[in-house]
Amino acid sequence: QIEAVTDPLLHALADQFLNALNLEIACVDKPSKTKIGLFKDDAESFPDLHAATAAVEEAKRAMDYLLPELRRKLGMPRLGYTTVGGVGGGEWLIEVPMDRSCPTTWIKVSSNKSKKVVRYHPPEVTEAAAALECANERHMFAADAAWKEFLSSFRENYAAFRSATSAVATLDALHALAILS
């Protein structure tokens, strides 16, 4: 039983499992409901997850790519996206002063009289935000699938890890008894 602790194949397997994980995320006290970020970005180990992560990054770049044109259209060099919670809120909003006109194709989402702004969703932003949302959902599903694949792979080696854990527990007990003797 003690030999299980020194088995080089088991050490290699343990390294393989640990190296697949992003330990900063895996060791958090309060685990997330999603598995996003749990694994290192490795195209070889988790190709679907890698592709989904790349798709999210590309969708975010597409959102950022729209800003210079929106800034030019409105003559607002510092224009950025705004997120507002509550009723009439939303993400990826363009906040424009009330005294400034916007294209008629823009959808008015809300206004704030105290800040004297109106919040809009330009059609191109709405389309890009929908693509980002789809990419985020695919990313979440890919992360969950990678987690199931990881568990399945671990399950195949469960007996070996259980033997090693039992052997370590025995060694720990013997060590404690030796200290007390």
Image (cartoon, rainbow, N blue to C red):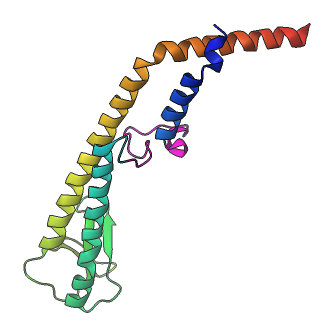
Most foreground residue, 94 or 1? 1
- Res. 86 visible in picture: no
Q: Residue furthest front?
A: 8
- The part of the chain drawn in magenta is 22-42
Question: Which of these two is toward me, 60 or 157?
Answer: 157
| Magenta-drawn stretch contains 28 | yes
Viewer-proximal residue among 120 and 3: 3
Q: In the rendered image, is residue 20 in sight? A: yes
Q: Quadrant of the N terminus?
A: top right
Q: Residue at x 34, y 79 (%)?
A: 115
**Image quadrant where residue 165 sits:** top right
Q: Residue at x 57, y 11 (%)?
A: 163
The quadrant holding residue 35 is: top left
How far across and how far down the image is residue 126, in percent? 16, 66
Residue at 32%, 61% in the rendered image: 57
Residue lying furthest right: 181
Residue 8 location (% of width, % of height): 59, 24
The image quadrant where one finds the C terminus is: top right
Residue 101 percent coordinates (x, y): 16, 88
Question: In the displayed structure, would residue 133 be above or below residue 151?
Answer: below
Q: Is residue 44 left or right of residue 105?
A: right
Horizontal relation, residue 101 to residue 30: left or right = left
